[in-house]
Amino acid sequence: MARRCSACNFWFEREDGYFVGATAINMGLGIVIPAAVAFTWLGLSWPRTPWTPLGVTFVGLAVIVPLVCFPLARMLWLSIDLVFRPIQPAEYHHEHALSEDAPE
């Protein structure tokens, strides 16, 4: 991910630990998507559920989904934050979002 917007020079990481919310979103997606697939498969195939393919699919999704959704989670977190905390003019001009002269 780029550190700044190429059009307006805005630092994406607005404060120290900024993307912790993105990590939480990504972890949620990594749990919800595989679980939804597993429960749907279980519901559709009950009572003759193929347990081995279901388990392999669940574990595979639990590994792949967070890797694939990582950029989406960061973008979603940044979008949510910008809705609630719009960019201040001073944020365009300081040297780095985490520098001493950064706005509070």
Image (cartoon, rainbow, N blue to C red):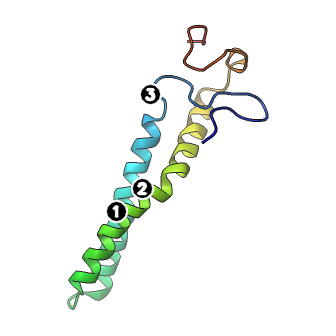
Residue that appears at 28% across and 79% down: 54
Q: Earlier in the sequence, mark 3 or mark 2?
A: 3
State left or right for residue 66 relative to residue 7. left
Q: Residues within 10 Å of mark 3 (few under 14, many from 20)?
A: few
**Label 2–label 1 contact, CB within 8 A:** yes
Q: Position of residue 86 (x, y in %)?
A: 65, 26
Query: In the rendered image, which quarter contains the C terminus?
Result: top right
Q: Secondary structure at mark 3?
A: loop
Q: Residues within 10 Å of mark 2 (few under 14, many from 20)?
A: many
Check the image and name the residue furthest to the bottom. Answer: 48
User: Identity of the amino acid at label 3?
Assistant: Gly
User: Does 10 sit above or below residue 80?
Assistant: above
For the residues labelled 3 and 1, the Cα–Cα distance comes to 25 Å
For the residues labelled 3 and 2, the Cα–Cα distance comes to 19 Å
Instruction: Name the disc covering residue 66, or none.
Output: 2
Q: Position of residue 101 (x, y in %)?
A: 61, 8
Q: Secondary structure at mark 1?
A: helix
Label count reads 3
**Foreground residue, 43 or 24?**
24
Instruction: Name the disc covering residue 62, or none.
Output: 1
Q: Earlier in the sequence, mark 3 or mark 1?
A: 3
User: Does 82 sit above or below residue 70?
Assistant: above
**Foreground residue, 15 or 85?**
15
